[in-house]
Image (cartoon, rainbow, N blue to C red):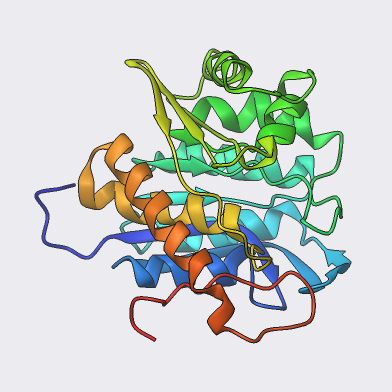
Amino acid sequence: MASTKNIPNVLTIAGSDSGGGAGIQTDLKAFSALGAYGASVITALTAQNTRGVTAVHAPKPAFITAQLDAVFDDIRIDAMKIGMLANAGIVRAVADALRRHRPAHVVLDTVMISKSNHALLAPEAVAALRDELLPLATLVTPNLPEAAALLGEASASNEDEMVRQGKALRALGAKAVLVKGGHLGSADSPDWLIEESGALRLGGARVPLKNTHGTGCTLSSAIAALIPQTDDLASATAEAKRYLTGAIEASDRLEVGHGVGPVHHFYRWW
């Protein structure tokens, strides 16, 4: 895709955040900030603000399929980001669509629990996510609790364990895995990118601000927006991490809510 002059079209398949700090709303902001046109398939509606999630409504899987087919029947999709899927039926509907439409790049953000500790994926759907979607992904981006849940293990407590779990997830079928180390509690915030060629450490300063709502969504959607523009996963991931760090650092410019606020996706412009 690096040779094309077309602005990339990137699809997000995720839940809606009524507070605007995560999910579909955050994905579209990140796409726009990084030079991509965003399309969307909404998998769930959440009643949500900076203090938590109070309700979730998930459409029937057939409606997810209808949205996906409508997009792919008309729009060239250069990359895709998958976020909240809510239940096993929706997981399978998305997996079926991916097998039919075969998008070039799929970034799977394994959304399971919100920052306010609200379950965003039914427990029985974890196996479907691992078995149906993970093998179709270009990149999977779990945090430490999510990686552990997918593997049925305890969360990694150090970087060696992060790498081992990343390799184990890649062995389940994903082309690459980005294990995010934000939960380590170390002075910095290291991520490990596991590809066929080996493991790459992506370091980064830990920004001491509370406005971190939607950081996982932002990182995965930023990678999806950048892959078609770089054609190099490591470069796209490193640039996405730099973009996210800047968005967190600038988040105190925003005054949104009274809880864990959002990052500033457009910090480079306003």
Q: Quadrant of residue 142?
A: top right
Label count reads: 0
Say if 208 sits above or below 172 in the image.
below
Q: Quadrant of residue 46?
A: bottom right
Q: Quadrant of residue 108?
A: top right
Which residue of the protein is positioned furthest toward the front in this rendering? 187
Closest to the observer, 171 or 66: 171
Q: Is 227 on the left or on the right of 125, as rendered?
A: left
Q: Position of residue 130 (x, y in %)?
A: 67, 27
For the point 74% across and 83% down, which residue is it?
257
For the point 26% across and 49% down, which residue is it?
228
Say if 134 sits above or below 264 in the image.
above
Say if 143 sits above or below 70 in the image.
above
Q: Is residue 242 visible?
A: yes
For the point 36% across and 56% down, which residue is it?
225
Q: Is 239 on the left or on the right of 67, as rendered?
A: left
Q: Position of residue 78 (x, y in %)?
A: 31, 52
